[in-house]
Image: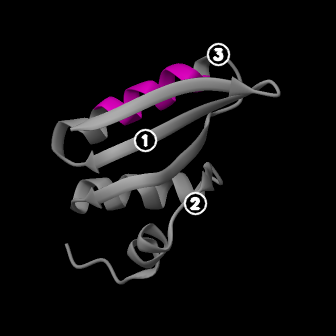
């Protein structure tokens, strides 16, 4: 299960992800990000509470990191983003 909380802080759209970033939830996140991007600058992501990410989730996080969208993360996810892709 993944909880996605949308908010706006100082005119910036934010998405807070909490839980497991796996399977169909990755596509839900992509859709929410695309919708937020259509309304203005893309959203900043707070992924501090993501506790697990499968291969698709890691790819999504790497894409968002490369685009400069990840604004808050944890040491767990930093390691995932830095680790070699094993898929």
Q: Earlier in the sequence, mark 2 or mark 1?
A: 1
Q: Residue at x 58, y 60 (%)?
A: 66
Q: In this image, 67 relative to 32: left or right? A: right
Of labels 1 and 3, earlier in sequence is 1
- Which residues lie in the magenta part? 28-37
Return the x and y of residue 72 as percentages of the image width and height: 61, 55
The earlier-in-sequence mark between 3 and 2 is 3
Q: Which residue is mark 3?
A: 39
- Find out whether residue 61 is within the magenta segment: no
SS majority, magenta: helix
For label 3, the SS is loop
| Residue 49's disc number | none
Q: Residue at x 28, y 38 (%)?
A: 2
**Location of residue 1 by image quarter:** top left
Q: Which mark is residue 66?
A: 2
Residue corresponding to mark 1: 17
Quadrant in which residue 53 is drawn: bottom left
The residue furthest top is 39
Q: Residue 4 placed where, x, y %?
A: 41, 31
Residue beneath the point at 70% across and 22% down: 40
């Amino acid at each position: 299960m993944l909880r996605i909380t949308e908010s706006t802080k100082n005119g910036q759209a934010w998405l807070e992800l909490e839980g497991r970033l796996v399977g169909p939830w990755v596509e839900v996140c992509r859709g929410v990000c695309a919708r937020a991007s259509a309304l203005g600058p893309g959203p900043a992501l707070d992924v501090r509470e993501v506790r697990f990410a499968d291969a698709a989730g890691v790819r999504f996080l790497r894409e968002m990191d490369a685009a400069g969208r990840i604004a808050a993360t944890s040491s767990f996810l930093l390691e995932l983003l830095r680790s070699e892709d094993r898929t």
